[in-house]
Amino acid sequence: MSTDSGLRPGHHAPTLLRGENIIIFSSDDWDSGLKTSKYHIARQLARHNRVLFVNSIGLRAPTAGARDIGRALRKLGSFLCGARKVPEGLHIYTPIVVPFFRGSSPIKAINGVLLRLVMRWLTFRLRLFNPIVFAFLPTFNDVVGTLGEKAIFYYCIDDMRGYRGVDLDWFSREEERLLLRANCTISSARQLTEEFRARGYRAYYVPHGVDWVRFRTALDDDLPLPEDMRDIPAPRLGFYGFLSDEWIDYPLLKRMAGEHPDWHIVLIGRPKAGMDMATLLPEPNIHYLGLKSFDQLPAYTRHFDVGLIPFGINPLTLHSNPLKLLEYLAGGLPVVVTDIPEARAYQEAVRIARSQEEYIAQCWAALQDNTPSARERRSRLAQEHSWEKRIEAISEIVCARILV
């Protein structure tokens, strides 16, 4: 599967970006516990460039709930640490803004001034002159375009209008500002790319990649069964990732558990704020194991029998490209996914279901296709979609736009 970069046929990929100053304005936090596309892109770029990763400014207004308060305190602690270097070879910075600013012009203006001042100071301190900027959300619009950028790229991985609680008017207006300012857009879903092009913007399609070397270890027979799965009998049908009900079809999981009490559904990840997993899923054969470190995931993959992507079908998921699909495949798992467009690119290796009945039937079929040779075949397919190859495609796009 090509990345549809939009460059000339036969154009050879240039040398990877090297020696550049790069700022990534992220849509999530480095220490969120989920290693999202921003983490992988930043880590790869930091191998040959100076990279500053700026943690997110939230799209939704915070609540007084314990989870949001805890997140605010963690952000404050990270902010007080300043720009810190992490083992991956890049710097991380957490900005602080006054919440609830979108309805108050004076506070919004103050936030903008403070962000510009601190970012200009950071670019000077870290010597990030004439940076290449990747903005994953328009929340940093008051800064983007003020740093003497060599180039600006809007890197869109989700249709944020699909999230509940997002101010749609504000987002549409600010996204338009970013689109007009950017050299071009890079999207991880073909549908997003086509919609940007239909609106008259230059857009390139680069699907997500996979840390193949890490997840390939799931084929190792010696990987021990994780302690918290020892009382969960096989077959184990597993999912890891963001467990928000905006993404996951929980009625489907409950139906699976009810119709197949011998199946054990294992969920790993972070639920949305306010979700009580024990109350939501009282079924005895659905097991929520909490959030695990990225390094632990191959061991769970090794002892899953099927990798689940039970997304509900909605505007958010239809514009998504789930990282876990390739992670499951790299670990050799048979994968069952609801019918989202990006899954169809891998239809020779995954099972796609268009209804609850079909999803359950495909899970049964996947359980029969879990031999060592089948696992090896799926892992080899995923190797062709490594993050290293995706960074080559991104480098090609960036270099082409810089030279325009």
Image (cartoon, rainbow, N blue to C red):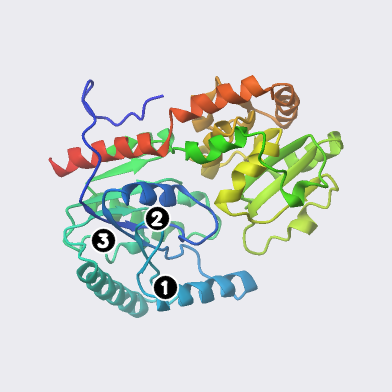
- In the rendered image, residue 62, in percent from the top left (x then y), is placed at 53, 71
Q: Is residue 52 above or below residue 17?
A: below
Query: Which of pointers 1 and 3 indicates the residue nearer the eye?
Result: 3
Q: Is residue 197 visible?
A: no
Location of residue 390 (image quadrant): top left
Q: Earlier in the sequence, mark 1 or mark 2?
A: 2
Location of residue 3 (image quadrant): top left
Give the secondary structure at mark 2. loop
Is 51 positioned to the left or the right of 288 in the image?
A: left
| Disc 1 and disc 3 in contact, CB within 8 angstroms | no
Between 212 and 34, the residue placed more toward the observer is: 212
Question: Mark 3 — residue?
Answer: 144
Location of residue 397 (image quadrant): top left
- Identify the residue at image location x=34%, y=75%: 111
Q: Is residue 19 above or below residue 1?
A: below
Three-letter amino acid code at the position of disc 3:
Val
Is 59 positioned to the left or the right of 263 in the image?
A: left
Q: Is residue 7 above or below residue 160?
A: above
Three-letter amino acid code at the position of disc 1:
Gly
- In the rendered image, residue 215, in percent from the top left (x then y), is placed at 55, 38
Give the secondary structure at mark 1. loop
Give the secondary structure at mark 3. loop
Q: CA distance from mark 2 to mark 3?
A: 25 Å
| Disc 1 and disc 2 in contact, CB within 8 angstroms | no
Question: Mark 2 — residue?
Answer: 88
Q: Is residue 286 visible?
A: yes
Q: CA distance from mark 1 to mark 2?
A: 38 Å
| Disc 2 and disc 3 in contact, CB within 8 angstroms | no
Question: Mark 1 — residue?
Answer: 103
Q: Earlier in the sequence, mark 1 or mark 3?
A: 1
Q: Which mark is residue 342?
A: none
